[in-house]
Amino acid sequence: MSVIKPSLAKGTRDFSPVEMVKRNFIYDTIKTVFKKYGYAEIQTPSFENLSTLTGKYGDEGDKLIFKILNSGEYIDQKSSDLINKINSAFLENNVKLGTIDSDIDKVSTVIPSGTEDLNIFKSLSDAEKAKDKYKQLLNELTPKISEKALRYDLTVPFARYVVMHQHEITLPFKRFQVQPVWRADRPQKGRYREFYQCDVDVVGSKSLLNEAEFILIYNEALSKLGLKDFSVKINNRKILSGIAEIIGKPDLIIDMTVAIDKLDKIGLDGVSKELLERGFTEADLEKLRPVILLEGTNEEKLSSLKEVLALSETGLKGVAEIEQVFEYVESLIAYSLPLTAKLELDITLARGLNYYTGCIFEVKTNEVAMGSIGGGGRYDDLTGMFGLKDLTGVGVSFGADRIYDVLEELNLFPASAEVGTKVLISNFDSEAEKYALPILQQFRTAGISAELYPSSAKLKKQMAYADAKKIPYVILIGGDEMESGALTLKDMQSGEQKKLSALAILDLLK
Amino acid sequence: MSVIKPSLAKGTRDFSPVEMVKRNFIYDTIKTVFKKYGYAEIQTPSFENLSTLTGKYGDEGDKLIFKILNSGEYIDQKSSDLINKINSAFLENNVKLGTIDSDIDKVSTVIPSGTEDLNIFKSLSDAEKAKDKYKQLLNELTPKISEKALRYDLTVPFARYVVMHQHEITLPFKRFQVQPVWRADRPQKGRYREFYQCDVDVVGSKSLLNEAEFILIYNEALSKLGLKDFSVKINNRKILSGIAEIIGKPDLIIDMTVAIDKLDKIGLDGVSKELLERGFTEADLEKLRPVILLEGTNEEKLSSLKEVLALSETGLKGVAEIEQVFEYVESLIAYSLPLTAKLELDITLARGLNYYTGCIFEVKTNEVAMGSIGGGGRYDDLTGMFGLKDLTGVGVSFGADRIYDVLEELNLFPASAEVGTKVLISNFDSEAEKYALPILQQFRTAGISAELYPSSAKLKKQMAYADAKKIPYVILIGGDEMESGALTLKDMQSGEQKKLSALAILDLLK
């Protein structure tokens, strides 16, 4: 076995004990809130059949799916046909034994290694043609040597789950799922090839109470994580459709939403320019501008929208939905945590995913410059891709990695979220060790995380160990302590030392 | 998008809400014990560089590693060379344009599809030769089109972690890790291609206190999971070495341990036969038999071993280690949970992994027929494969999937481990819904998982929903209830109904 200098696969991360405790603090907080609202956890496998995933994320998404090589016998069963095709490509391109011309360097990539002397290639042009053909054939190879792929998100596996288990589950089905997903993106700061998604969805219920509860879930979870200033933005696809309708360009709704979604980034002038490029006229812009720039309270915005959309049934339906959601939030919040979240109707909110059909959400923190830390919406046909029609659903997700960065930057992780072991008993010699064993175990039996340093190393080393693990207390047991039964308890933060009996220490630490 | 009948990838599982609650009960119980003993959680990525994993699990293991296809540009960069080799295989095997003989069916797998009319193959024999060559070349293809692979266990990634983070971590480093691993095994009952491992290890400490604590960890975790009769078997590689030494066959230690490890399955006669086949003589067997059949209490076994191994320094060291472990357990257990585990010195225990150098463990339940539900041992050179020498470690793991099956069979999952939502408020009409909203939220604010049925469906349907989700209480709110403020609380298990105020219900459910 040769020795390899170890490294991480590109775009992946190890999580240290300290990071894990912080990550668990986030997941546990979010999951506790999900459960309080009646959501139950499910998990789906890390890999799915390739056919379950492909075609669901657009061409760009499909390219980012990590595919798993068939194991074992894939060579015999699947590939020979393809290899033969590759060979036939040689024939089709008239690549035969012949004389290679002077450009031999340029075609080296397609020259069979070890067969250079055979001078297989007649000319550069043929070789290039052959190369193109290989590429095409190798694209065909992939599905033959790979039939499985890593989960790309939690939504498509959830849709598969609902369809496969439709006879076991009772609607409405309220589920949450916190699992990693994998994407073959180019890694960069804050973007990884493996990251967790935290999704919460309900399918089979049209009630807008669900939408309202998601707002409360965001409010409660993010407040409990320590955020003090964040916005939950809400919009409704039907309002966007209504606007496109009123302008007389219902077919251009996608173009319209893509453009106005950029208001934050490119300003009104930029949006106007893009709208003109995308087929809108100056007259359309005249009508659109006041809608895009809609200001005031949510009530004011809604009342303006009702005027603007007076002639669009769809648009008014969207307004009514938002009003109903606000009403539910109002009724619920009286007996909840205060509504820390700024709930804000934002007409420019579009979100990329075209399957949304009703309310859409996006969550941002106002304390740190950071993209959205959550979002979601209602979709009317999630499971249609697997043959189960007309099942409405609504769901949101939390961007746990970004939330982690926000909490880190704002120094919001509670100190308690960093403590693992609560007390270390030092180890002077075998006699002190023997004395310490029952004390050690008494602490554990009382539910206190405790360690005995496992050898009689120098005290400095033992203290450094406690420091590195952020253990808040160390008990020192020497000859005096054993004689008197009064142990020395050192508070590692203050440096303070007291003499206490083992039982008194236990009471203090409990 | 064509509609696909969804299915799971072979050997993988979905976990429903009920299964997840039970699985989390197992993980949470085990993790809580790990933490109490000073172990901290880490996580490593789901995939590693292929070079990190290959060569660590033997040839058989290597075949079971799931490899991930390089994403994006793998075709251009990596494969052309190989394709060329495949082509050259055609040439080397004299597969040229020619006439195929009568055995065309048998060679169809190597006939280029679409080029059958070209009659590429001169003879069956050449085609078979070509086919063998392809196989070999395609085995070479894998490393060119795949550079990453899914985690096969948690041990090798942990070794990589320790080496990569050696300057950040303080020794002894006590970590636990609970994550899925993937193996391309043929799926069968109880064997899956994705399953969780729960590993706990300490590196950088020679103290046998660690071994003793693992026994207590098994004892506490399995007792808390409800097991009442289970054995922790212990042995020591040095004792096995000592025995081989005494017989005068130290080189045959592997053969010896492999054979006597099978005592349970094939009996003494079977073991004797296998030992003879593996190079031992009748005279050796004479000496081995009393050791293999060693009976009595642990003390009796140890005292017999001391006699047998009197001339083997290594063997006596192994005995002394076991004695020290027992002594530590003795000192610790006085203030612990009672030692439910039967702690049993078992000389026939060998465990497959050759990297163990000291104590080895295996855990079995005696209540259900089931393979081992845990095991582990001490290894003296785990990180050597990544260039960090002489770092000793010891660790054990829990077989969570098997423990799940055991608890299920013995009906040991606590009822509380099945409850998600605690109370459902029924929904008769919009007036009752409005009345219910603040009550709903009061419950949640008090930490009680509560749901309001999201539409005024038929009561029967709402009750069926509560039943399906195993919600223990339903609150009925009709006209009478709204008028009097006395709500009807139905206990779903007993069927009993009482009239109580919202606050009284809240007190009752808290």
Image (cartoon, coloured by chain):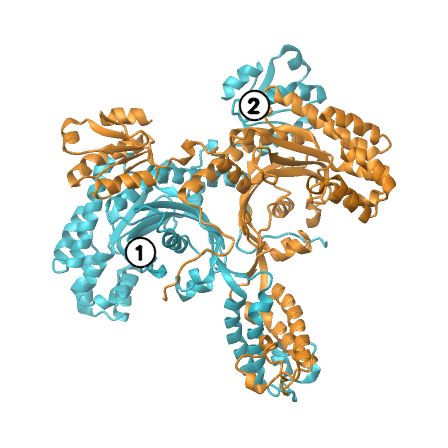
Chain colours: A cyan, B orange
Q: Quick one: which residue is furthest to the top in this view? A: A484
| Left or right: where B39 falls relative to A389 | right
Q: Residues within 10 Å of mark 1 (few under 14, many from 20)?
A: few
| Residue A180 against residue A49 in the figure, above or below | above
Instruction: Provide the chain ID for the residue under circle 1.
Output: A
Q: Is residue A7 visible?
A: yes
Q: Quadrant of the C terminus of chain B?
A: top left
Q: Is residue B171 visible?
A: no
The amino acid at mark 2 is: Leu
| Left or right: where A306 falls relative to B174 | left
Q: Which residue is mark 1?
A: A264
| Residue A125 against residue B203 in the figure, above or below | below
Q: Position of residue A230 (x, y in %)?
A: 32, 43
Question: SS class of the residue under badge 1?
Answer: helix
Question: SS class of the residue under badge 2?
Answer: loop
- Picture residue at 54% right of the left edge, 50% below the top: B192
The amino acid at mark 1 is: Asp
Considering depth in this image, is B459 or B312 the residue closer to the camera? B459
| Left or right: where A230 falls relative to A464 | left
Instruction: Provide the chain ID for the residue under circle 2.
Output: B
Considering depth in this image, is A309 or A489 the residue closer to the camera? A309
| Left or right: where A196 falls relative to B388 | left
Considering depth in this image, is B342 or A503 the residue closer to the camera? B342
Q: Position of residue B94 (x, y in %)?
A: 69, 82
Q: Position of residue A411 (x, y in %)?
A: 44, 38
The Cα atoms of the two marked residues, 1 and 2, are separated by: 61 Å
Q: Quadrant of the N terminus of chain B?
A: bottom left
Q: Residues within 10 Å of mark 2 (few under 14, many from 20)?
A: some
| Residue A467 against residue A23 in the figure, above or below | above
Q: Which residue is mark 2?
A: B337
